[in-house]
């Protein structure tokens, strides 16, 4: 693979003429406006363009590099000591490209950009102009009070602090990769790490209590969400599952998965789940809504559907009095199914298939197994409930 190189014109933001060469012959040429004087453009014949300006460089996907505003913003930021708002626009463009390439979810990108924008507004209001200057306002912003739904001022919870931290860290990590800064935020106290815990599996007593309470909602999406969740579905599955994905004849559910979760067919784990799903399907049929979602409506964005699915499970957990335990979250239902599957097969790969992941580490985390101690978790699930992956 050979590279081509061209130099920008003498104008500060002129037009660089850039050619593709291979084997000594020119394969094509293109004018690329928006590059400052002294910039070099290297283009491989694969999918990326590498931009250089002094000690700074930026690798861009080819389709993104053709949006020359991105290249200009990057180079302008490096020439002006990484101004905050310029850096934000560059990182925003890179993250949007990651979404297009399937490397970042729309939901994560939107949430992170919103939080980073808030952080930059806060830092600028405090007098910061560059990335390095903004770091001194990182910790105060993490703990800054926000607004509740009634408009009152409230301190941030641990989960809000954690999300703020993740967004700003990702911003600085991307900016550092692009050469816009050498700094990164300091790590928070151990208390912040507690908020990052993703949720433990339900135990059998909690699963039974949840079934009992959900039975009182059997003609609603809440009971159906519990039944499918205990079958091994995550919120991404619940957001996209449709009535025809449930096959009562052979007792299976096809889980559609998501961006990073594989689709799979799982068993309906027990009679309770079977009965709840039978009622839900009949209700949708009687209402003429077979083409709607099983848990949430098929209209709206993927993010809103997934949020709606999480709300349905959270309502069931709240009604059962399980939300008082901060370690119980919507994912706890899926992790109950993962735990029961591991007890049945004693095979972590079976757990990974149930969860729709190829990562055995992710599967081990789901069942609370620390690989370093060599001992699998002690399990005591009921024999009459047997979740598992079919295909």
Image (spheres, rainbow, N blue to C red):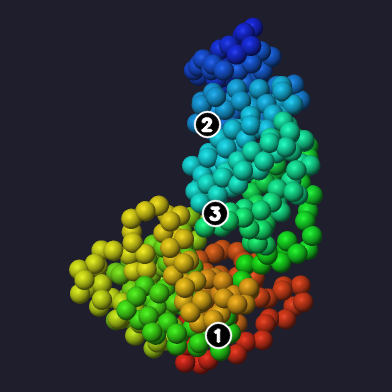
**Mark 2 = which residue?**
64
Q: Is residue 239 above or below residue 129?
A: below
Instruction: Please say whether residue 372 is visible from this viewpoint.
Output: yes
* Sequence-earlier tag: 3 or 2: 2
Residue 206: numbered disc = 1
Q: Which residue appears at 39% of the width and 62% of the height? A: 240
Q: Quadrant of residue 39?
A: top right
Q: Quadrant of the C terminus?
A: bottom left
Q: Does 376 sit left or right of 243 as displayed?
A: right
Q: CA distance from mark 1 to mark 2?
A: 49 Å
Residue 259 image offset from top left, x and y in percent: 48, 55
Of 280 and 26, which appears nearest the observer? 280
Q: Name the mark nearer the viewer: 1 or 2.
A: 1
Q: Residue 77: name its quadrant.
A: top right
In the shown orientation, is residue 271 left or right of residue 82?
Answer: left
In this picture, is 188 found above or below 114? below
Query: Label 3 belongs to which residue?
Result: 151
Q: Residue 249 has which mark?
A: none
Q: Locate residue 189 relative to residue 376 in the image: left or right.
A: right
Depth check: give the residue in front, 1 or 162: 162
């Amino acid at each position: 693979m050979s590279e081509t190189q061209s130099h920008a014109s003498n104008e500060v933001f002129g037009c660089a003429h850039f050619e593709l060469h291979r084997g000594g012959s020119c394969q094509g040429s293109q004018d690329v406006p928006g590059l400052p004087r002294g910039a070099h453009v290297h283009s491989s014949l694969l999918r990326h363009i590498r931009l250089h300006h002094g000690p700074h460089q930026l690798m861009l996907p080819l389709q993104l590099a053709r949006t020359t505003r991105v290249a200009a913003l990057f180079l302008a930021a490096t020439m002006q000591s990484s101004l905050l708002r310029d850096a934000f626009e560059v990182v925003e463009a890179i993250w949007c490209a990651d979404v297009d390439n399937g490397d970042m979810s729309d939901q994560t990108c939107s949430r992170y950009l919103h939080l980073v924008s808030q952080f930059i507004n806060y830092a600028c209001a405090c007098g910061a102009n560059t990335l390095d200057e903004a770091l001194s306002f990182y910790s105060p912003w993490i703990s800054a009070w926000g607004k509740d739904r009634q408009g009152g001022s409230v301190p941030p919870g641990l989960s809000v602090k954690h999300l703020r931290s993740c967004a700003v860290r990702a911003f600085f990590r991307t900016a550092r990769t692009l050469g816009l800064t050498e700094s990164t935020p300091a790590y928070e106290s151990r208390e912040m790490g507690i908020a990052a815990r993703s949720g433990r599996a339900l135990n059998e007593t909690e699963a039974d209590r949840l079934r009992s309470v959900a039975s009182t909602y059997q003609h609603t999406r809440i009971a159906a969400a519990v039944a499918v969740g205990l079958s091994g579905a995550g919120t991404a599955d619940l957001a996209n599952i449709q009535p025809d994905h449930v096959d009562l004849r052979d007792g299976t559910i096809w889980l559609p998965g998501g961006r990073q979760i594989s689709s799979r067919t799982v068993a309906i784990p027990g009679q309770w789940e079977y009965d709840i799903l039978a009622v839900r399907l009949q209700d949708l049929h009687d209402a003429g809504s077979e083409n709607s979602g099983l848990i949430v409506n098929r209209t709206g964005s993927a993010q809103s559907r997934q949020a709606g699915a999480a709300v349905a499970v959270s309502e069931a957990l709240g009604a059962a009095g399980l939300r008082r335990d901060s370690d119980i979250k919507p994912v706890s239902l899926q992790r109950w199914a993962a735990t029961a599957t591991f007890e049945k097969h004693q095979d972590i790969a079976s757990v990974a298939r149930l969860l729709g992941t190829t990562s055995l580490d992710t599967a081990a985390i789901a069942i609370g197994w620390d690989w370093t101690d060599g001992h699998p978790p002690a399990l005591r699930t009921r024999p009459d409930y047997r979740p598992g992956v079919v295909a």
